[in-house]
């Protein structure tokens, strides 16, 4: 049966069930790990819940998915209290300094730290909340003017200062490569991020456990290149069908 959900702005049509989608993605993760000679448990799936209503998040949670990602603070602030308290949340969008307090309160990890100034503000808010905040450093791997993220050399230059912030824990790197309908074309960008992580580990003299890279269209290639976190939305929830102006009764 077709299921339609009102998410305030969009209608979603899920011809294939969430259970089927989740199972298919888990199988693809296992297969990609097998090709790379890795254990399937070395990859964590973040279900990207942006624009998805709380009832759909809770439906996926009932199937065993516990880690979700949001990219807008305002949406997360409204949605997370309506979802199961057992869920874990990563912030994966561009974070403005004036939203850092909410980000520290709502999320267990911020994946998109793209400047020393932003890291310092997160550290300040984490100090006020008496909380340690795991972060990933977002890298603009293709140097795209339209995207946020560190340039690689600047990241390396600021890394020790970032790592010295007492309330932050630098866990690794994150990137969004240029869009391409051909997953294989994303591979050089994933390789570049993996190589940058190795350089960062050399600077710090310590391992960075995470590479967050790969989305619905290319996560298998990302896993083959070392991703430990993949962020999947459309392949789980289905594509948005139509914009609406008012709630569905």
Image (cartoon, rainbow, N blue to C red):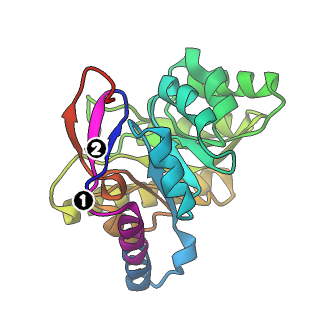
Quadrant that contains the N terminus = bottom left
Question: Residue 38: horizontal and vertical position, in percent?
Answer: 50, 81
Number of residues whose C-alpha sits closer than 10 Å to that of mark 2, classed few (under 14), some (14–19) or many (20 or more): many
Question: What residue is rendered at 19% in x and 60% in y?
Answer: 185
Q: Quadrant of residue 236?
A: bottom left
Which sits in the foreground, 233 or 114? 233
Of all residues, the one furthest to the front in this rendering is 249
* Residue corresponding to mark 1: 15
Q: How many marks?
A: 2
One can see residue 54 in this view: yes
Q: Quadrant of residue 99?
A: top right
Location of residue 162 with respect to 210 vertically, above or below:
above
Question: Residue 26: horizontal and vertical position, in percent?
Answer: 43, 72
Left or right relative to 232: residue 217 = left
Question: What residue is rendered at 42% in x and 85% in y?
Answer: 34
Left or right relative to 106: residue 146 = left
Question: Residue 155: horizontal and vertical position, in percent?
Answer: 50, 39
Location of residue 81 with respect to 49 vertically, above or below:
above
Q: Magenta part of the protein: which range? A: 9-27
Of all residues, the one furthest to the right in this rendering is 130
Provide the secondary structure element on which disc 1 rests: loop
Left or right relative to 167: residue 22 = left
* Residue corresponding to mark 2: 12
Provide the secondary structure element on which disc 2 rests: strand
């Amino acid at each position: 049966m077709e299921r339609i959900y009102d998410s305030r702005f969009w209608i979603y049509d899920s011809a294939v069930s969430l259970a089927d989608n989740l199972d298919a993605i888990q199988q693809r993760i296992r297969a990609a790990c097998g090709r790379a000679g890795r254990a399937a448990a070395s990859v964590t799936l973040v279900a990207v819940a942006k624009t998805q209503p709380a009832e759909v998040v809770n439906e996926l949670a009932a199937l065993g998915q516990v880690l979700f990602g949001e990219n807008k603070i305002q949406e997360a602030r409204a949605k997370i209290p309506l979802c199961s308290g057992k869920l874990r949340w990563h912030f994966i969008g561009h974070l403005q300094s004036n939203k850092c307090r909410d980000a520290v309160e709502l999320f267990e990890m911020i994946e998109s730290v793209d400047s020393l100034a932003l890291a310092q503000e997160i550290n300040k808010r984490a100090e006020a909340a008496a909380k340690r905040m795991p972060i990933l450093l977002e890298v603009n791997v293709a140097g795209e003017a339209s995207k946020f993220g560190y340039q690689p050399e600047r990241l390396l230059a600021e890394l020790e200062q970032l790592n010295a912030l007492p309330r932050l824990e630098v866990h690794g790197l994150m990137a969004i490569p240029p869009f391409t309908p051909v997953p294989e074309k994303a591979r050089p960008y994933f390789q570049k991020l993996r190589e940058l992580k190795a350089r960062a580990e050399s600077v710090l003299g310590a391992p960075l456990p995470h590479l967050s890279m790969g989305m619905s269209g290319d996560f298998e290639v990302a896993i083959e290149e070392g991703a430990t976190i993949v962020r999947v939305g459309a392949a789980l929830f289905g594509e948005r069908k139509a914009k609406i102006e008012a709630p569905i009764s």
